[in-house]
Amino acid sequence: MSSSLEQKIPSIDAIEDGLASQGYISSRQIATALFLAVRLGKPILVEGPAGVGKTELAKATAGFLDLPLIRMQCYEGLDESKALYEWKYGKQLLYTQILKDKLGEQLRDAANLDEALARLDKVDDIFFSERFLEPRPLLRALKEPLGCVLLVDEVDKADEEFESFLLEILSDYQVSIPELGTQSAKVIPIVLLTSNNTRDLGDAMKRRCLHLHIGYPDARREERIVATRIPHVQANLLRQLVHFVQALRTQDLRKLPSVSETIDWARALILMNAGQLDNDLVHNTLNVLLKFEGDMTSAGKLVGEMTHQAVREGQAMAAK
Amino acid sequence: MSYSQSAAKRAETQAQTSDMILRLLRVARGAGVRISVAESIDAFESANAVGFSDRQVLKDALTLTIAKTVEDKQLFEQCFETYFKRENTALGGKIAEAGRKPGAPPQGEGQPGDSQGEGASSSLGQMLLDNDLAGLAAAMERAAEAAGASNITLFTQTNLYARRILDRMGLPELEREVTRLRAEGNTELADRLARARAALGEQARAYMERQLTLFATGTTREIREGALRQVNLSQLDRRDIQRMRQLIREMAKKLAERYSRKRYRDRKGVLDTRRTIRRNMAFDAIPFRTVWKRERIDKPRVMALCDVSGSVASVARFLLMFLYSLNDVLADLRGFAFSSHLVEVSDILSRENSDDAVTKILEAVGFGSTNYGKSLEDFSALALNKINRQTTVIILGDARGNRNEPRVDLMGGIFSRAGRVIWLNPEPQPLWGTGDSDMYRYAPFCHQMVTCNTIAQLERIVEELLATARR
């Protein structure tokens, strides 16, 4: 099946290293999920809060396995013709116009209507051949000769009908196009589905997938993530800001800051030439981390204490 | 020869590991993780793919394949930890001490064969004398498997199974040996074996107790919950209330999942021109694909009146809890509670959490003396003009109005406006109409009157309600 792919990732450690080489600091569980997905040929359903790197995981996977990444963004009203394939109607029309004379020539010497129809039958297949087929992401993923990483982003935004339609493709890796017959995958693609939990996915869908939940990273992993993204960040500042964000996540907020916000914040702090956190600085840049007015006010009261704590812990870590 | 031997050995270990995974899955199911057959097959495949050498990786792999929600993941990880926890150390120490020669310096882990001089003839005795803890643990595991230890369901079976395990480990042989040694006059060795044997018995019992907590929680819970669904709500034990609450919540969630979807029905034969043209833009608006008009199937509009008076006090709590759960399923539910008078509780139901809501409602109107007439009057004033053909009115109560005027005329007014009137009475039918019960006077104005005093009945009624309202 995908033996070459299996050779590329002999072990879970190899995946972790591979992802790290793409700047994606994974956890052991994420690497295990990918390993199993390749070995068992199963899609992975990735859930978790926004901004923890669900989409990024697909990009990094494609990057280190050197496979093309095919991305399909889901939204309400997405249907087969946009996800699977469509006939190039305009081209078909144009070609019939151009070939009109040719067709007339062919049919001119037909003795009667029956014979003309029989001749037409012979040529009509050319209008429903691959030449006029516009493959959409799902079909493209199946036809990729060396396999690919297929990212079905935010599958919970699509309608339930579409979810059931996906099931068929994800379990057999094949689709049937009435005019052309069944198209099976040349190499089984690595499929990642992401969901933000705007609605519960069906049980049937969950059953067919490996279920990976990516939560907020712990302090050490978050430090490593920020350090890979922003290599020139000072170690001292890095420790402090990660501590601060980690503390912020324990608060009762409407939207907790996620990794992408930590990175943005770190960038902002560097732009402001900050060497370490202090009260005013945090107050002025808090809007990078928090996206709701209510969160800002409720967290604002605690900023002083949390900043102090973060600075102290950062120093304690440095002393070690 | 050697090849077939190793193959046989491999097959044996494979059988052992697959048994282990099967048992683990059973434990997880018992703890409440939902695992389908397809998922258990996946579990085997993924376990084989990652191997058994690294426990953390195995745990991750199984969690990924089996548990599909965050709660399930936590549950499963707990199960995994308990299942593989080995508590041998404490008791093992005792065995080691008992098996040691008096006066001999304590050794750490027993080295098999370090006391070869003094022979015990039975293999079990030898292991005990050798302090071969690993060997003993393995032997116990094997014996437990042969004795079917994972089938334990009741705590009274602990001793029985412990005895079976010891028997299979070769206890009779050991006991014979002790007797023989005593007869031969070798009391010292006999005493040591007897002490070790006692410690071993303790360990077997501890082992079975762990098995009980692992495997029996699921079954006993199933039995208990099955019983709870059938038990009369007014005769519930205090200690079951917590579990009952859980059951009601689960039931409501199940109903919500099944009925929360928006449903549409095609109106056959009526073309949706606008959407047809839009869909066929690519074909020069020549309608290759037609779109038909659809209509949305409305969810039932429910008004629920819940009696919280003294006479139904024991049931009221559950009726309210149920009302609360219904509130999650049906978006526009209006809830009312009454005893001597009636108040609307929709606000409380949607704002508070279930326990607070129930307490608040009971504080507001609870446990008074019932007056159905007054309550119906209040209800008519509040909501009669909002009742129409789409409305289902559910009344939960025993219809005992303390000989007050029942105001049947008001009930008639509700009946003539509403699509359906359902009366759920916690009393069994033979009691209807006896004493101060006005049940049969209200009867002409109800589409349906049913006894409802168990969770199972409640579930059936709501299921019916939700299903019929769709047609």
Image (tube, coloured by chain):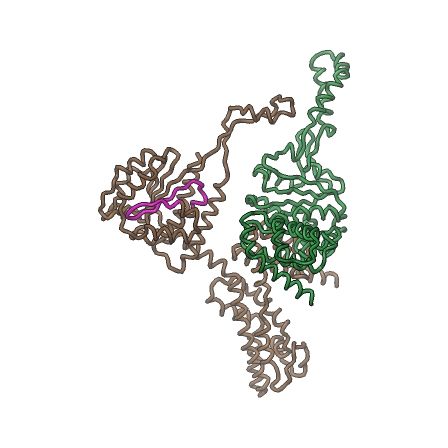
Chain colours: A green, B brown
| Residue range (magenta) | B326-346
* Residue B58 in sight in this render: no
Viewport quadrant of the C terminus of chain A: bottom right
Viewport quadrant of the N terminus of chain A: top right
- Taking the magenta stretch, the answer to whether it contains residue A207 is no
**In the image as oriented, which residue stretches furthest toward the front?**
A280
B241 to the left or right of A252:
left
| Residue A121 or residue A75, whichever sits in front | A75
B233 to the left or right of A88:
left
Q: Position of residue B332 (x, y in %)?
A: 43, 40
The answer to which image quadrant residue A304 occupies is bottom right
Q: Residue at x 60, y 60 (%)?
A: B20
Q: Position of residue A63 (x, y in %)?
A: 74, 47
- Taking the magenta stretch, the answer to whether it contains residue B332 is yes
Q: Residue at x 32, y 50 (%)?
A: B365
Image: B7 above or below B172: above
**In the image as oriented, which residue stretches furthest toward the bottom?**
B185
The answer to which image quadrant residue B409 occupies is top left
A90 to the left or right of A283:
right
Q: Position of residue B355 (x, y in %)?
A: 41, 54
| Residue B85 or residue B313, whichever sits in front | B313
| Residue A301 or residue B360, whichever sits in front | A301
* Residue B159 in sight in this render: yes
Q: Residue at x 64, y 71 (%)?
A: B134
Q: Position of residue B266 (x, y in %)?
A: 51, 29
Circle count: 0
Image: A189 above or below B147: above
A159 to the left or right of A35:
left
Q: Residue at x 39, y 42 (%)?
A: B334
